[in-house]
Image (spheres, rainbow, N blue to C red):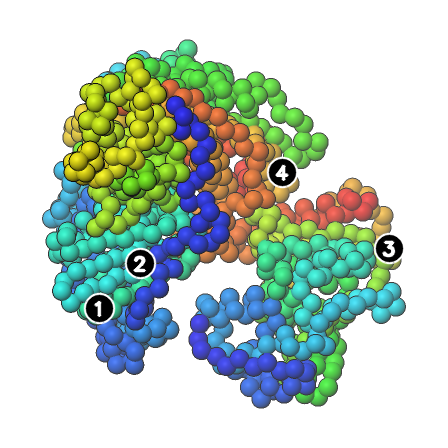
Amino acid sequence: MKEFQYLLPHTVAEAVALKEKYDKAAVFMAGATDVVVRMRDYLLTPEYVIDLKAIPELGGITFSKEKGLHIGALATMNEICADENVKQYYPTLAKAAGSVGSKQVRNRATCIGNIVNASPLADTATPLYCYDAIVEIAGPNGTRELPITEFILFVRKVALERGEMVTGIRVPFKEAQGEFCKISRRDQVDLSTVCGTVLKIDGTYRVAMGSVAPQPRRLPKTEALLNGAPLTPERIEEAAQLATTEVSPIDDVRADKQYRLDMVAYIVRNALGKLA
Amino acid sequence: MKVVGTSVERLDAVKKVTGTAQFADDIQFSRPLFAQVKRSPYPHAKILRIDTSKAKALEGVRCVITGDYYKKRSGLYLEDKNFLAVGTAKFRGEPVAAVAAESKEIAEEACRLIEVEYEELPAVFDALEGMKPDAPLIHPDLHTYKVAPIFYPQKGTNISHHYVLRKGDPDKAFAEADRVFDNSFYIPHVQHVPIEPHACTAQYMPDGELTIWAACQSPFAVRRALAETFDFPLNKIRVISKAVGGGFGCKAGTTLEGIVIPLAMLCPGRPVKLTYTREDEFQYAYVRQGLHIRIQTAVRKDGKIIGSRNTLAWDGGAYTEYGVNIVKAAGWGCVGPYDIDNIATDSYCVYTNHPVGGPYRGFGMSEIHFAIEQNLDMVANEMDISPLDIRRINGIREGGISATGQKIEVAGYQECLERAAQLLEYDKPCEPSGSPTKLRGKGLAGGWKAPSMPTDVASSVIIRMNEDGTFVLLCSCHDMGQGSDTVMAQIAAETLTVDPSKITVRTGDTDHTPYEWQTVASRSTYCAGNATKLAAEDLRNKILEVAQIKLGTWKNDLYLEDGYVCRKFYPDMKVPMSTFALGLSLPDQSGIAGPMIGVGSFTVPNNIAADIKTGLSPKPVAFWTMGVNGAEVEVDTETGKIKVLKMVSVFDAGKVINPQMYEGQAEGAMVQAMGTALYEELKLDHGRVMNPSFVDYKIPTFDDMPELVVEAVEKAEPTGPYGARGIGEIVMVPGAPAIANAVANAIGCRFLRMPLTPDVVLAALREKNKKQ
């Protein structure tokens, strides 16, 4: 690991000021489960690491039916998957958060980190995509908000400007039914080979897939097909096949392209089968 | 027997669970230096120029070396290895230079400052390609290398050993057979993944003494190999091995020691330390060799196999100094525990530009049995015989003959087979899964293994008696988690009639513990166990020698019981053994005899090397351990995922010294076998390891553990201590093919290559559906 300077701001304003000052030479760190791993492998070589853990306002998970769910930047995966409101009203998100890494990793890893890291296979991304989650951003010019689908731009690329940081994610409350599914080589302590979420909200369907494109992705054609007519076995199969045309997976050490396409179809078919 | 056959608590249990056992990396030194290695980015390249000047100029750097500094080759059986590349780099990641510096960070930075110019050479990435006459040569001077007389490198090729076995008349058998089968399999490289990575510290003193603290299974073999390479007399080099966190073979030979020693020699007085990371472990320690294996089988219509032809091409990697012996061992065991009269086997060790192959639990047996045992099921299936029956028909029995022509005096294979089938309820269909897309199946597989070691290897043990009647047992068979310390204590305690808690076992110091060839080959309970028993008997005899004076009788009237010397005809006239710990004090206060020390030296009796032309020997190995694994699996036909529901393990262990540790070995082995069957593969792309960490190299977790059932058949080994024989490796051998056979039973697809990953399973199902 390259030597770096460790910075510990106590307010969001301080953190933003530091990031604006050092820009690309600095990296934010919360749980460190992505940052430190990448620094150890020299994939990241920052001169400054800005630790967010001493900023109290970034912690916590709050929920009301009016305001929806709010996840602070320091909320860990284990906090999320153990939260009673998340379990009751956002079970797909609870399941996704609980599927990340190992229990020890989930004690440190944060959901916001998972999203800012912008890996195509981020486990918590697909439920958040389906819920139309809003990313809350603080920067030198104040705060702004972005839909999550517009926040993640590409592999490890997000729509943050100089000095900006993510302070939290807001997930609107909607009565929803559906499934999160993670396909991995091993059930515990593994990355997604493919992950996906299928939700039915107010009678319409939302489908999102991870690890099958440069970024997590909603599948609009598949959603349109499903929203057009009743859910019959034929329609389910049609949707499963259509879903595979809306993704562009690659071969890698975890699986080949064909397997990923098969799993996209499987996730859609399986989740819809339970909704039918 | 009071102690042998009981589940005595492991001697290291408290230290291990409290985290206080000391491993090689835990040792703190005064004024240490830290080593780092500059490695080749190419799988095969000529080294044109190395410029170390910038590295040497960096503050805190103490010395920098390249292959030019020590050019002498090293190796256990074939001296083909340089610890630092000389002339050419032969695998991606081969050390080309090394640095010792005041901190690890400085050493890392220094490595980055070393400039190396290479010329890439054509490379070999497959054993079969490497055997072709026009293949690029990786060791052009192979024919000049020093080699043990039982290995046969082929001049002008990449073949570092060709083992030939010719038994009976295979041509005739194939001509007369009712059915002939021809199946080929591939077993990819895997890594041992011990919980503790390799670590080594070397300190060279100005007076010429060298001490090495290393995580190693075999301190004496390491001492000898290093002494020869670096020209030390054996009394000037000392190897110390502390607690070892798993070896599975990868800590048997020399790996990073040879990088650290020359650095230490240039910095007299300073300990130089190198600890591998997990990523290093995957690429630069040892890996299990890859294997192409073709099996041709000649079968009579009643299911009796009358002939077998086997071609094995092993991917030995860049250096095969250890690997050649695996290739030979696989030849000896080539048809598994089956009695076949006519056999032709060719086992080739082939150089490739892959990571260095080395010993791995099973020593070739796990690899060949993946093929042998699936082949048997395939033959049985084609001939409409049950997999159980084909094993009953061909499985070895007492008086049967091994592939090398050895008469098998003790053979529990058939009993293991019947019991494993019972435990698995092999005759009954699986319980329904409750889902049409989850299919279940059962599979059986047998296996055998012998200790593959030079025929004259030796063991020794010393037992010292303390004044209070406790004992210190010194040996160099090393406990790396398998429990050998406890086994030695139990054998000694049994012989000396004391509680095992009275015996302390000390190992792993070539200056202070007696000679042991190696802790490998599932030989320790047998070889070191025999030496322990001899040492305890020697001690007993010495005690009785002086006790007869004290008790006014002669020693044939005396015996030991519960720590006392007793008289046969007057059992009440007993004296505590401790009375004689320092000899015997006579009534006038004079003393005789001195402290009681028992010595035991053991060499396997009557082992004879195999013939060069036929590969035959009436007794090339001490014993064969055999047995059977069974597996029940559930295959998800939508995701391709295999879940192992249950595994059973029944082996003829001889007398089991410690049932709980036996169970632990068998359980660990089944899970390790399951890992190789379902998950593990070192993914290689043009010599690059694509998954050199646990991110993408998966081994089973607790969550994946199936129900495990362990039993033993106990047919005593006539020459083993208290009837014991080795079991550490064989209990893994049939695990993977048992799973593959169960999968074939579940979904009707046969997998000729490991591992059976979900994508492979789904592709096979698709192919099968297309055909239907």
Q: Nearer the viewer, mark 4 or mark 1?
A: 1
Give residue B614's position: percent from left, percent from top.
19, 26
**Are the residues at dot 2 and dot 1 in contact (C-beta closer than 8 Å)?**
no
Q: Separation of disc 2 and disc 1 at Cα?
A: 16 Å
Q: Separation of disc 3 and disc 1 at Cα?
A: 77 Å
Label 1: chain letter: B
Residue identifier under label 4:
B636
Q: Could you tell which of marks 4 and 2 lies nearer the N-terminus? A: 2
Give residue A47's position: percent from left, percent from top.
49, 81
Mark 1 is surrounded, within 10 Å at the Cα level, by few (under 14), some (14 to 19) or many (20 or more) other residues, namely some
Specify whether disc 3 shares its chain with disc 2: no
Give residue B16's position: percent from left, percent from top.
45, 49
Mark 2 is surrounded, within 10 Å at the Cα level, by few (under 14), some (14 to 19) or many (20 or more) other residues, namely many
Residue identifier under label 2:
B200
Q: Could you tell which of marks 2 and 1 lies nearer the N-terminus? A: 2
Mark 3 is surrounded, within 10 Å at the Cα level, by few (under 14), some (14 to 19) or many (20 or more) other residues, namely few
The residue type indicated by label 1 comes to Gly
| Residue B380 in view here | no
Q: Nearer the viewer, mark 3 or mark 1?
A: 1
Which residue is pictured at 25% across the width and 69% down the height?
B270
Quadrant of the frame with the N terminus of chain B: top left
Compared to B556, does A8 lie above or below? below
Circle 1 SS class: loop
Q: Nearer the viewer, mark 4 or mark 3?
A: 4
**Which quadrant of the figure has residue A145?**
bottom right
Name the mark on residue B269: 1
Which residue is pictured at 29% across the width and 41% down the height?
B467
